[in-house]
Image (cartoon, rainbow, N blue to C red):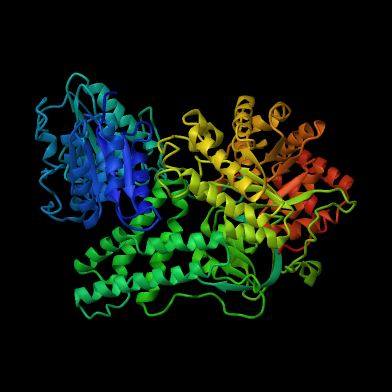
Amino acid sequence: MTDRVGVVVVSHSAALADAVVALARQMVDDDPPPIAVAAGTDDGGLGTDAMAVHAAIEEVASPAGVIVLMDLGSAVMSTETALEFLDDPPGPIRLVAAPIVEGTVAAVVQAALGSDLDTVVREAARALDAKRDHLGEAPGTDGHDQHAPVERSSRASAGDGDDGDDGDDGDDQPDAREEVIVVNRDGFHARPAAALVRAATGRDARVTLANLDGDAAPVRADSLSAVAGLDARAGTRLAVAAHGPGAADAVADVVALVRGGFGEPLADGAAPDSAGGDTGAPGAEPEEDAPWPDWAPRRASQVVVLAPGRAVGPAVRVARGEASPTTPDAAGGDVEAEVSRLRDAATAVAKDLDSRAEQAPDDTTRDVLAATAMLARDPDLLDAATSQVRDGTTAGTAIRRATDEVATTFRRAGGRLAGRQRDVEDIRDRVLAMLAGHDGAALPDRDEPFVLLADDLAPVDAAGLDPATCLALVVRTGTPTSHTAVIARARGIPAIAVGDRIDDVPDGATVLVDADAARFTVDPDEGATDPATRRIAPTFDGTGRTADDHRVALLANVGGPDDVAAAVDAGAEGVGLLRTELLFLGRTTPPPMEEQTATYRDLFAPLGDRRIVVRTLDAGSDKPLPFVTDADEPNPALGVRGIRTTRFDPRLLDTQLAAIARAADEVAADVVVMAPMVATVDEAELFAAAAASHGLEAGVMVETPAAALMADRLLDHVAFLSVGTNDLAQYTLAADRLDGRLADLTDPWQPTVLDLVGRTAAAATARGRPVGVCGEAAGDPALAVVLVGAGVTSLSMVPRAIPAVAAALATVPLDRARELATAARAATSAHEARSLVRDEVPLPPAT
Ligand code: PEP
Ligand code: MG
């Protein structure tokens, strides 16, 4: 394809810009145009920077030109300053006053189609028309600048003939026409609309669509704003018509796309029908009464493990904060006072989150809280809410609408962003509570230990739990990747999601939360309520071993200075996984060598002479980095991640290795390095050569079945192996580790995963080489016994899990651990493997 128009998004908030770009990319996932972001400040704060805008424009500039979309005031000023510094760009640069979300989506879709700059600018400029139509507002006369002349897109545009081709006026007899019913549940939201525009563009025919349940006026099918403005919902009847020699094919393709439901969830009772015929559209008899087949598992009965550990105690329920959508208009009709009330409430929430972040007991919790505070300050979010207040809405309703819109954007973007939906909802609830005059805290204030039951606990509330009294957390729904789960793990609070079973627990009933066995029991047997099963912290004497003194090094996983301190406190024998992503995350350019060296030095120094295994940058998939990975990858988990990034630029790895080696030298630390996501012997060989060039010993992570199955050949080149069970489970079971719905598949107790660990360990043992496990599995006391029985020589885990794992190992002789490993590998399911081990190993309580 020849050069396409580049799109630049300038925003005060990196999170916002990334979300907007992620959303826009969803519309063109297979073929995006060049897109660049200039957002936030270098230190992760809010603001814009002319030089960053300059760099972004240069990045995507071509003879086809560049469209720049900006959020608030100074974003425009920074962009204008950036233009002054541009020397002779290869094509025109156009600044557009379009709304940043809708405008970016429209521009990206249109640019992806190869449209010229005028068309891209025009589509972006009228990107609000669909929403205005829908809300019955007059076409906008504001918000369009001289760069983007306003053109009404929808009703008139089918016949406006503005591109001077066949002059379809919508009244001529079309060369082909067919009717079709919309079957996808969410109708023509942005993604299907974009798919339709793609299908209708570049044809030898002019395609139009008409909503037969609406005003039936045909609109151009090659305009995103026109298609989005059709207000086509599930069940809407559409006429697809076309003029021109390719009319029949064009209509057939568009109809097939609509009938197929765009690959999205379908409306109740609808069935996709890409071959035509009966659409099975809404209105067809839904089979609601059909019995659930006997063989089908009951989803509600599954326990999803969010954080490991066991605890027993009285159930105390917390209701999700009731946030009233109609908080009283305390400003008594004074709009500006109501605006201030809204902004003051949001500021108070942000400040509260800041101070909670400052006091957070660990790095993880602090990072989550700081990120949530940024959301409460997000200028676009607040501007959206403020303008609603100025339109006469109360502050409460305004913040609810604005946050719900962002939450929906996140949900639709999927992946990690979808996991952030709950964070936005939490901001909404907190601002609403603040507006209503209370701080929203609804957590039980008790001295007696209890198990907390909550429909859905916000991460901020999870951070406020005291592990000394809150023995465990039980929620209705949750995913292991949610911030609530992340915090529960960091704080050592066992947590599970139990679905509707949460309704069956009487207040005050004794409940047993056994996250290690994925079990939840109301009124458990006497034995289970024995105080010995409560969470009592075991201690670790600094030497990991089985009951018969077989040595197993117990190491810590660390990512930042607080983790290092925790590792030292826990008596970790060394660091089995130092994740280096923290140094790179949230940046648009790689940290320079000096900065990396200083950071590594600060991390190494407190560890004294303990051995430290540093994992080189694992960018990609769940850890995307703008300067390394391509955000347009259709399958990031299967794409360019980990060691694969060196195919495209080996310099990042080289600089990192140089910095690690230099830092190790400076503080005389015992450092080795390992590569993530290795799948071939060549990659191991390449990494070993790279490490050797900096005088470092190399190992590789075993995270793919390929690496596990050829472990012996990897060891021809590297000194040690470390199994990353998080990814190994993902790739063995072919299940996205970020998708909570598939958490049972990515369970490290899956016998296939255990079998691959066993094979890897056998290969290493045969050569007398060390083999560790550094995935979450290593921190599960019962699973640790199995891993040792399977032959691993070290276990690396979150520091706070070390005492419990040490205590579990100390109860089992090596031969018994081997028998349990054999049995677990031979089990037919994760559940069976876990149960048979848990029934055999007298586990200590988790800390
Ligand atoms: C793993 O995959 O098990 C692992 C330790 O790496 P990460 O979780 O950082 O991908
Ligand atoms: Mg991994």
Residue 436 position, x and y percent, is 36, 78
The vertical placement of 793 against 338, above or below, is: above
Residue 106 position, x and y percent, is 25, 41
Residue 483 position, x and y percent, is 52, 58
Could you say which quadrant of the image residue 754 lies in?
A: top right
Q: Report the quarter where the N terminus lies.
A: top left
Q: Report the quarter where the C terminus lies.
A: bottom right
Q: Nearer the viewer, residue 592 or 279?
A: 592
Q: Quadrant of ligand 1?
A: top right
- In the picture, measured across the screen, residue 349 lies left or right of residue 535, that is left
The vertical placement of 59 against 310, above or below, is: above
Looking at the image, can residue 555 be seen? yes
Q: Nearer the viewer, residue 786 or 241?
A: 786
Residue, far front: 666
Looking at the image, can residue 746 be seen? no
- In the picture, measured across the screen, residue 585 lies left or right of residue 824, that is left
Residue 426 position, x and y percent, is 43, 64
Q: Residue at position x 26%, y 74% from top?
A: 340
Q: How many marks?
A: 0
- In the picture, measured across the screen, residue 86 lies left or right of residue 847, that is left
Q: Nearer the viewer, residue 258 or 328?
A: 328
Q: Residue at position x 10%, y 34% from top?
A: 159
Could you say which quadrant of the image residue 63 lies in?
A: top left
